[in-house]
Amino acid sequence: MSEIHEAIEKAEEGEHGEGFNRRIALVIAILALCLSFSETLGKGAQTEVVTKNIEASDLWAFFQAKDIRRTVVSVAADQTGLLGAGVADPAAKAAIDKQIETWRQTAERYESDPKAGNGRKELEEQAKGAEEERDLSTAKYHHYELASAAFQIGIVLASAAVITGMVLLAWCAGALGVVGLGLLLLGLFAPHAVPFIATL
């Protein structure tokens, strides 16, 4: 009779173990799915960081080139004005004044050219915009990386729970999954909400 009782207990334990393992397998599958999202979003954010950094660098280089050109043209206008002050011939004086005015207009266009959108002021705004987008993508990237780490550790703990049968490991894996999901959502919708994470 005791043999039958032991066989029934082992069968019940086996059913319980299979159910536990199925639930852990589901947790692992969900964590792996979330990990794939965080990794994909992280790679996209990383690419955006590089792209916007290059864009900002190019815009600042263009800004500096415009500034050099503006300075050269302004100096030429000032120098020609000083040298032309002693010219007595009215035709020569008119030609000098016309050239000075052309240089001044060119210097003003280098300073701001809203029509073409490539004056110093416009380039500065564009470069700062690219830097802001780069910083936003960097903050997102940090969130996605931390989320990926949480999901990976959760998968390891869930796998260990299957091997050891320790329910505590399964709960820790689930908790890390929730933390990872929170970080993933913060990265998507509010990457600057937690300044500490954004500066990692």
Image: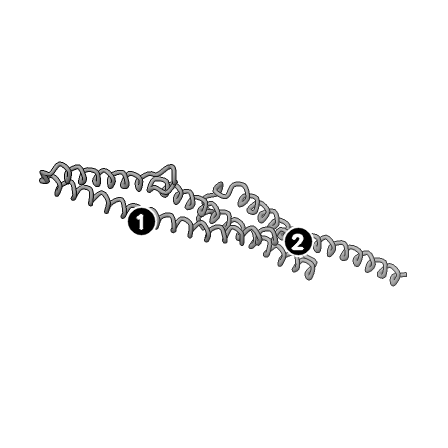
Pointer 2 or 1: first along the chain = 1
Q: Which amino acid is tagged 1?
A: Ala
The crowd level at tag 1 (other Cα within 10 Å; few <14, some 14-19, many 20+) is some
Determine the residue positioned at 23% across, 37% down. Answer: 101
Is 168 or 18 nearer to us in this picture? 18
Q: Which residue is mark 2?
A: 170
Give x and y (percent) for residue 18.
77, 57
Q: According to the image, label 1 marks what residue?
A: 65
Q: CB under 8 Å between callouts 2 and 1? A: no
Above or below residue 120? Residue 169 is below
Q: Residue at x 68, y 56 (%)?
A: 166
Q: How is the image coloured?
A: one colour
Which quarter of the figure is the N terminus placed in? bottom right
Quarter of the image for residue 22 reads: bottom right
Residue 151: percent from the left, percent from the top? 60, 53
Drawn side of residue 192 relative to residue 154, left or right = left
Residue type at mark 2: give it.
Answer: Ala
Q: Nearer the viewer, residue 77 or 111?
A: 77
Q: Is residue 81 left or right of residue 121?
A: left
